[in-house]
């Protein structure tokens, strides 16, 4: 059997620069496809599209990764916008929520990374803390902190011990969405990973595995996709 095809959602930026060009661009930090490749998968980029096309896209994939990025629009979970919440990304919100719902409906393995974990929680009716301190080292600088798995969880099977992870986020899960359970925490109690109980494979991590060397989370997704 060939390598499983792993779709990864992308940014949509009004301006990006490369070579002599400065244009609107659908883009993805190279760490994402490289991590998929190191873990044994084939990476496919999923730029924002009409939400009605999400099920057709997911049907062609073996697994879906919803990548990190801008803050989820608080209107998506019925909250007033905090002054510290970033500008909305409506195309990404709509497309990635549709990807999540399509993956859940079809039983396609699903991994949410940072924003992707938060959006998974929102897709299932959960809410977010719009700002917390201590999880961003500095603007544009990825920090590290310890996360501890919940015994007996899917994440604990992947990484049974406490470990330091690359982190860059100022929002977090508040109320868990329907059916979701917390499966890892930071030392301050912040929910750092969420999952849906089996039979499917659905996991969200608040940190950025594509910014580090630990391939275990992506490796587990690739195995589930195989």
Image (spheres, rainbow, N blue to C red):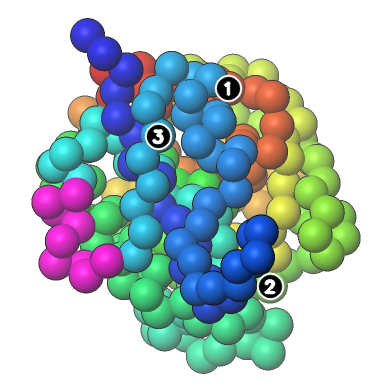
Classify 10 Å Cα crowding around label 2: few (below 14), some (14-19), many (20 and above): few
Q: Nearer the viewer, mark 1 or mark 3?
A: 3
User: In the image, residue 76 lies at what x, y percent?
Assistant: 38, 78
- Residue located at (63% from left, 44% from top): 207
Task: Identify the residue under disc 1.
Answer: 215
Which of the 4 quarters of the picture holds residue 138? Answer: bottom right
Which of the 4 quarters of the picture holds residue 170? Answer: bottom right
Per the rendered image, the range of residues in magenta is 49-57
Q: Nearer the viewer, mark 2 or mark 1?
A: 1
Is 204 in front, or is 65? Answer: 65
User: In the image, residue 8 lies at what x, y percent?
Assistant: 40, 45
Alpha carbon distance from label 2 to label 1: 28 Å
Looking at the rendered image, the quarter that the C terminus falls into is: top left
Q: Is residue 101 left or right of residue 141?
A: left
Task: Identify the residue under disc 2.
Answer: 131
| Chain-order first, disc 3 or disc 2 | 3
Alpha carbon distance from label 3 to label 2: 32 Å
Would you say residue 56 sits in the magenta stretch? yes
Q: Nearer the viewer, mark 3 or mark 2?
A: 3
Secondary structure beneath disc 3? strand
Classify 10 Å Cα crowding around label 1: few (below 14), some (14-19), many (20 and above): some
Would you say residue 10 sits in the magenta stretch? no
Task: Identify the residue under disc 3.
Answer: 43
């Amino acid at each position: 059997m060939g390598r499983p095809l792993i779709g990864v959602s992308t940014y949509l930026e009004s301006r990006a620069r490369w070579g002599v060009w400065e244009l609107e661009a659908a883009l993805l930090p190279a760490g994402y496809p490289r991590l998929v490749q190191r873990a044994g998968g084939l990476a496919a980029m999923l730029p924002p599209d009409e939400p009605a096309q999400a099920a057709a896209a997911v049907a062609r994939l073996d697994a879906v990764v919803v990548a990190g990025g801008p803050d989820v629009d608080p209107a998506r979970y019925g909250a007033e916008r905090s002054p510290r919440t970033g500008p909305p990304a409506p195309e990404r919100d709509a497309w990635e929520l549709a990807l999540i719902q399509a993956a859940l409906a079809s039983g396609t393995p699903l991994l949410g990374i940072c924003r992707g974990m938060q959006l998974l929680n929102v897709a299932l009716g959960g809410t977010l803390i719009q700002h917390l301190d201590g999880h961003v080292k500095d603007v544009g600088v990825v920090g590290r902190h310890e996360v501890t798995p919940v015994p007996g969880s899917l994440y604990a099977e992947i990484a049974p011990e406490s470990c330091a992870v690359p982190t860059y986020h100022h929002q977090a899960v508040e109320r868990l969405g329907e059916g979701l359970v917390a499966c890892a925490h930071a030392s301050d109690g912040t929910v750092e990973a969420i999952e849906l109980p089996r039979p499917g494979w659905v996991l969200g991590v608040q940190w950025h595995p594509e910014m580090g060397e630990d391939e275990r989370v992506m490796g587990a997704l690739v195995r589930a996709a195989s």
